[in-house]
Amino acid sequence: MRLRPKPASTVRTAPTAPQYPPRTGGGTAAADAAVELRAVRRTYGRGDSTVHALRGIDLALPRGSFTAVMGPSGSGKSTFLQCAAGLDKPTAGSVLLGGTDITGLSENKLTQLRRSRIGFIFQSFNLLPSLTVQQNVLLPQRLAGGRPDRRRAAGLLAQVGLEGYGRRRPGQLSGGQQQRVAIARALVTAPEVVFADEPTGALDTNTAREVLGLLRHAVDRLGVTVVMVTHDPVAASFADRVLFLADGAFAGRLERPDPTEIADHMVALTTAGTDRAARIARAAA
């Protein structure tokens, strides 16, 4: 996959990361949002054991953008992703996908929506070992009740560098190749949004960069909106923006940052959280 480089003066990126051309459009107004969260809260438990995983999240992510979400352990990253993707329902507030309020949908309608308008990529690939690569890619279309488009599957496999691999089984592929299959599978239904949960967590550095380049390509060339949770500053530097969560609330935002800036921000957040926990412990003693 060859991409035209972006002029160096327009963006700051990691020194060794590939660079990409600017997109047109992609405003930040809620009307152009691919994903919107309005005063989203998520709590677990009751009384003294209540956990406030999300504390009133307000956010609108523009179409055709790449957003990374980071934060210390327990900051609410996974809960944010699950609520935004319709995998979990907020305790309060609403979530909109392309202007559709998905908060009150029945589980059947939510399932239909996720199958047709959302793609998922996970750290563990989640490929079915008994199916071929092509069958894994086509699985979302089958689950959605559509007719499998083998030509589209072959085209997507070619885009992710796996042309001719359709008849192989996942067990015959490397970890990086399996994640490429997962990306093709996430894109096969032409989703509005792809949610990625630590997509490079199980990969070596070079393979991770290749996978991140494919996600960047999906945004820049295909107009897909990507929302990625990651702990890796280098992975986050591939995004248009990085949002930081701490204690269930947003605690910062960086636009087109380099890995060093991201790492510095994470250190500050982690240090602040450790200091806060120490103060609480001393007060309770």
Image (cartoon, grey):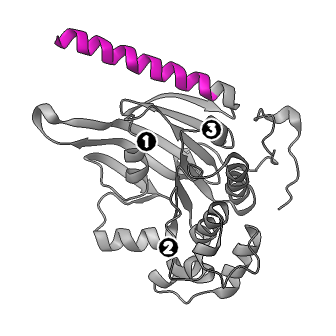
The residue where tag 1 is placed is: 77
Magenta stretch contains residue 271: yes
- Disc 3 is placed on an element classified as strand
Q: Which residue is painted at 76% across and 68% down in the image?
A: 161
Compare marks 1 and 2 and give the one earlier in the sequence.
1
Local crowd size for mark 2, using a 10 Å CA cut-off: few (<14), some (14–19), many (≥20): some
The residue where tag 2 is placed is: 116
- Disc assigned to residue 222: none
Q: Which residue is painted at 63% across and 48% down in the image?
A: 66
The answer to the question of whether label 3 and label 1 lie on touching residues, with beta carbons closer than 8 A, is no
- Examine the rendering and report whether any part of residue 189 can be seen: no
Query: Which of pointers 3 and 1 indicates the residue nearer the eye?
Result: 1
For the residues labelled 3 and 1, the Cα–Cα distance comes to 15 Å
The residue where tag 3 is placed is: 241
Amino acid type at circle 3 is Arg
First to last magenta residue range: 262-285
Compare marks 2 and 3 and give the one earlier in the sequence.
2
Q: x%, y% of residue 76? A: 38, 39
Nearest to the observer: residue 105 or residue 83? 83
- Disc 1 is placed on an element classified as helix
